[in-house]
Amino acid sequence: MSLLSDLINLNLSEVTEKSIVEYIWVGGSGMDLRSKARTLPGPVTDPSQLPKWNYDGSSTGQAPGEDSEVILYPQAIFPDPFRRGNHILVMCDAYTPAGEPIPTNKRYNAAKIFNHPEVVAEEPWYGIEQEYTLLQKDVKWPLGWPVGGFPGPQGPYYCGIGADKAFGRDIVDAHYKACLYAGINISGINGEVMPGQWEFQVGPSVGISAADQVWVARYILERITEIAGVVVSFDPKPIQGDWNGAGAHTNYSTKSMREDGGYEVIKKAIHKLGLRHKEHIAAYGEGNERRLTGRHETADINTFLWDVANRGASIRVGRDTEKAGKGYFEDRRPASNMDPYVVTSMIAETTILWKP
């Protein structure tokens, strides 16, 4: 008698060349990921080889019931760490049957910005630090916390080890390896300041690929927590009170910033970001005002401040960048639930294309 695990791990390449493709897209809330699979006759190595597909947009909050068909356009493919073999994950964006991007398709405008000749010439690099919180499934309370109660105060948990400090490391490590398998440029993980909270970093990645990779890394994390019976939260302030929130610090550089004299380019870019502070904050994640309080390693949401090595600033420049006179800076304002298509393209547009 076969076990369920035996069947899940069947090596299909022994009997067929067919491959399973998991189409992934962002749902109507702008944060919910959806996916469904189809069989193709053979291996696929490029999104252009994949057929467009459709789904019922009335069931995802993206179309009315009387005209519910939404079309998926494959955009980026990744080896599937769950099915392995020739099977793939594909990140898609969504369009009407007439070919118009639907309102929740944030990738479309991001691609226009990243394809602009001035942006292409500057080769924007991103390193995105995605924080998240693991929750106990039935009570929606952080993993490792006593139900209805609180652990000891913050201090020992950041990058901590031990059964009383690190909760959910098996999930975190499984996610780390699955992302590497999928070809995501995941550059590290660590335990965060609040117990039950973790972070993974994607990058450095160029242009829109950074956002594609963050979305697929989120998808893989949600699938792994599904298997583990744990809920992942991207809420920017999951627990009120004297606990750290969750952000998605976005490290950024352009070709000009990475070359000699780049520090002056960085300062000009930061000045432009300051002039558009309100517009960026409005696009940097829902509920971010609960996180950006001026406490817990944040700047106040209404204040724009940049500084060297200051984790209480809106924009932080590293000591190495200051010393070298070139490099990158970190935008600490984006919330953990930000849309990486919006944030990455907006930073590029403000710093490269916008002429105040």
Image (spheres, rainbow, N blue to C red):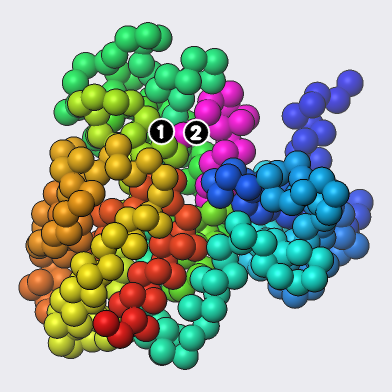
The residue that label 2 is drawn on is 232
* Identity, as a three-letter code, of the amino acid under mark 2: Val
Crowd class of label 1 (few under 14; some 14 to 19; many from 20; radius 10 Å): many
The span picked out in magenta is: 217-233
Relative placement, left or right, of 249 versus 343 is left
The residue lying toward the viewer, choosing from 52 and 9, is: 52
Labels 2 and 1: the sequence-earlier one: 1
**Among the 4 quarters of the image, the one containing residue 269:** bottom left
Q: Which mark is residue 210?
A: none
Relative placement, left or right, of 51 versus 320 is right
Crowd class of label 2 (few under 14; some 14 to 19; many from 20; radius 10 Å): many
* Identity, as a three-letter code, of the amino acid under mark 1: Thr
Q: Are marks 2 and 1 in contact (CB under 8 Å)?
A: yes
The residue lying toward the viewer, choosing from 54 and 8, is: 54
Disc 1 secondary structure class: strand
Up the image or down, 181 lies above or below 253; here it is above
Residue 305, percent from left and from top = 13, 59
**Among the 4 quarters of the image, the one containing residue 266:** bottom left
Q: Let me know if residue 186 appears in the view.
A: no
**Among the 4 quarters of the image, the one containing residue 134:** top left
Q: Is residue 145 magenta?
A: no
